[in-house]
């Protein structure tokens, strides 16, 4: 209810850390699109967690988790070799499996061939032929 009142601010009353450029998160009373754009362009690049009711340490925790996730993903995308013992690498196994799957695929769909087969069976007027 109060959040839409003119002059309401989302800034905490006593922030623990300073909000960049002393920006005030408010609900503006503009009527023009250009005024809203100007206001939005003033937003800080990174919002303070305090705006969302969180402690500033939440941002630190978020950054640590993001960095850990990034390094985990980088580690998982590194090529895995078969080692020097002459074993087969993961890439070779994947290539072999993909080749097997390609061999088991049916022939390419030939629309004209199937239409001719359906015509021989009585055409599209027979309900069962619609599903063939």
Image (tube, grey):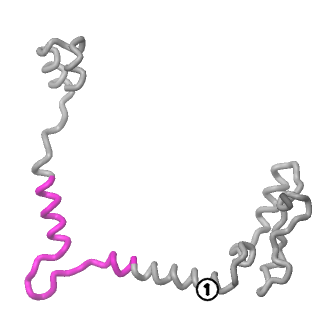
- Residue 7, picture quadrant: bottom right
| Residue 86 located left or right of residue 129 | left
Number of numbered discs: 1
Q: Which residues are magenta?
A: 73-101
Q: Is residue 60 above or below residue 53?
A: below
Is residue 81 located in the magenta-colored stretch of the structure?
Answer: yes
Q: Is residue 56 above or below residue 100?
A: below
- Most extreme residue toward the left is 86
- Residue 55 position, x and y percent, is 69, 83
- Residue 10, picture quadrant: bottom right
- Residue 104 position, x and y percent, is 11, 49
Rendered residue at 17%/38% (across/down) = 108
- On-image quarter of the C terminus: top left
Rendered residue at 12%/63% (across/down) = 96
- Residue 90 position, x and y percent, is 19, 74
Q: Is residue 98 above or below residue 90?
A: above
Question: Which type of secondary structure does the marked residue at label 1 adopt?
Answer: helix
91 or 25: nearer the viewer: 25
- Most extreme residue toward the right is 7
Classed neighbour count for the residue bearing mark 1: other residues with Cα under 10 Å, few (<14), some (14–19), many (≥20): few
Q: Is residue 44 above or below residue 82?
A: above
| Residue 2 located left or right of residue 53 | right
Say which residue label 1 marks. 60
Rendered residue at 14%/54% (across/down) = 101
Rendered residue at 77%/62% (across/down) = 40
- On-image quarter of the N terminus: bottom right
Is residue 41 located in the magenta-colored stretch of the structure?
Answer: no
């Amino acid at each position: 209810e109060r959040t839409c009142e003119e002059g309401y601010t989302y800034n905490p009353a006593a922030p623990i850390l300073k909000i960049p450029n002393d920006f005030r998160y408010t609900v503006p009373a503009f009527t023009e699109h250009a005024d809203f754009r100007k206001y939005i362009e003033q937003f800080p690049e990174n919002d303070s967690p305090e705006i969302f009711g969180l402690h500033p340490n939440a941002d630190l925790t978020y950054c640590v988790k993001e960095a850990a996730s990034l390094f985990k993903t980088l580690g998982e995308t590194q090529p895995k070799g078969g080692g020097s013992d002459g074993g087969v690498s993961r890439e070779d196994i994947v290539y072999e499996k993909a080749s097997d799957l390609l061999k088991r695929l049916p022939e390419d769909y030939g629309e004209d061939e199937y239409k001719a087969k359906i015509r021989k069976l009585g055409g599209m007027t027979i309900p069962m032929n619609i599903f063939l």
